[in-house]
Image (tube, helix red, strand yellow):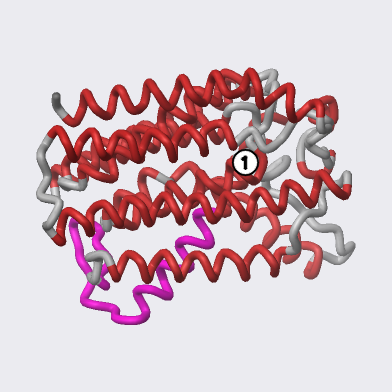
Amino acid sequence: MSLWIINLFTALLSFAIAGISGKWLVPFLHRIKFGQPIKTEDGPQWHAKKQGTPTMGGFMFIISTLITAIGGYWAYRITYGLDTTSPETHKAFYRMLSVMVFSFLFGLIGFIDDYTKVARKNNDGLSPWQKIALQTLFGFGFLFMMYRFGDGSTTINLGFWESPSLGIFYYILMFLVIIYLTNAVNLTDGVDGLCGSVTFVAMLIFTISSAILCENEISCFTMALAGGCLGFLIWNLNPAKCFMGDTGSMFLGAAVTGVGLVLHNHLLILLTALVYIIEALSVMIQVSYFKLTKKFRADHQGQRIFKMTPIHHHFEMSGYSEYKIVITFSLAGMIFGVLGIVSLLVF
């Protein structure tokens, strides 16, 4: 049995678990009144009709991914007769496990944030500083695990160019990447089905990339998550019956970032995650431009570049349907990701 067949079965099983679990989870979330509070200033006014839609649906793909990734790994290990006494075999497994734990811990941050919002019946969850403190703790913990389990390189690898060793500055830079990218994925969760679809594409790209880079173990995780995202989309495509919440989006953010850092090809990370990066960048541009124009204009009226950010809301307010946004952004993610794969083959 080849690794591709094992991964295919892993993805299918994860898809089934995530999809079927929604038949229990969605009614349960309705019953305990875990509905999403909606602030109209955070999105188009017509999103108000989504008020009360169950949140924390990210548990569907979190549970399915964690279960099937471990199962897929052991199927791979037994099928290929990997040497259980080999330090390299153990390090490869622990790198995959580190990504899983890292993703789970960020999902836990999201769960605390979601639970606080639901308990308060508004959109005020954890404070920004509380989130940053937890993300800092778990982010540096993950980087330490990467170093501990075999990734001691401190160079920036862009394929066509590799930096000299950056030492401790590499870990500081990668920490900033973790903070930016995990929160960028969180910002992408603003249209029904968008974050799950874009992440499904990203995980397929990472699966092919891991095969090229001979990081077979991590592909067990990426395919499990791809299947889990697809199963969740049964419940999340417009009109969404359930939202993933910060529980899901923070898990996905850490998964995308963690897998990218394990593969240690920074051009691949940049291209595969470019949709998320643009989403967060649109917010930064909008806020900065508004503050500057408000400060320097005579009437002190701030100006905007986009109709609303993150940028998917700009397209939504320009007349794009939620389905069209999901398809367009997912295709863009696929194109960027394929360029990332090409860069691995060329450089």
Asked if residue 56 is positioned above or below residue 162 in the image, the reply reads above
Residue lying farthest bottom? 168
Is residue 296 shown left or right of residue 56?
Answer: right
Residue at 60% across / 47% down in the picture? 186
- Kind of residue indicated by mark 1: Ile
**Magenta-drawn stretch contains 311:** no
Residue lying farthest front? 85
Label 1 sits on residue: 311
Q: Is residue 17 visible?
A: yes
Query: Which quadrant, please, contains the N terminus?
Result: top left
What is the x, y in percent for residue 310? 65, 44
Residue at 79% across / 35% down in the picture? 34
Residue at 80% across / 57% down in the picture? 302
What is the x, y in percent for residue 342? 21, 40
- The quadrant holding residue 227 is top left
38 or 221, which lies in front?
Answer: 221
Is residue 115 shown left or right of residue 282?
Answer: right
Q: Is residue 281 visible?
A: no
Asked if residue 111 is positioned above or below residue 33 in the image, the reply reads below
**Magenta-drawn stretch contains 166:** yes
Asked if residue 56 is positioned above or below residue 263 in the image, the reply reads above
Q: How many marks?
A: 1
The residue carrying pointer 1 sits among few (fewer than 14), some (14 to 19) or many (20 or more) residues within 10 Å by Cα, namely many
Which portion, as a residue range, is magenta?
154-182
- The quadrant holding residue 95 is bottom left
Mark 1: secondary structure: helix
Is residue 164 shown left or right of residue 110?
Answer: left
What is the x, y in percent for residue 300? 87, 64
What is the x, y in percent for residue 265? 26, 55
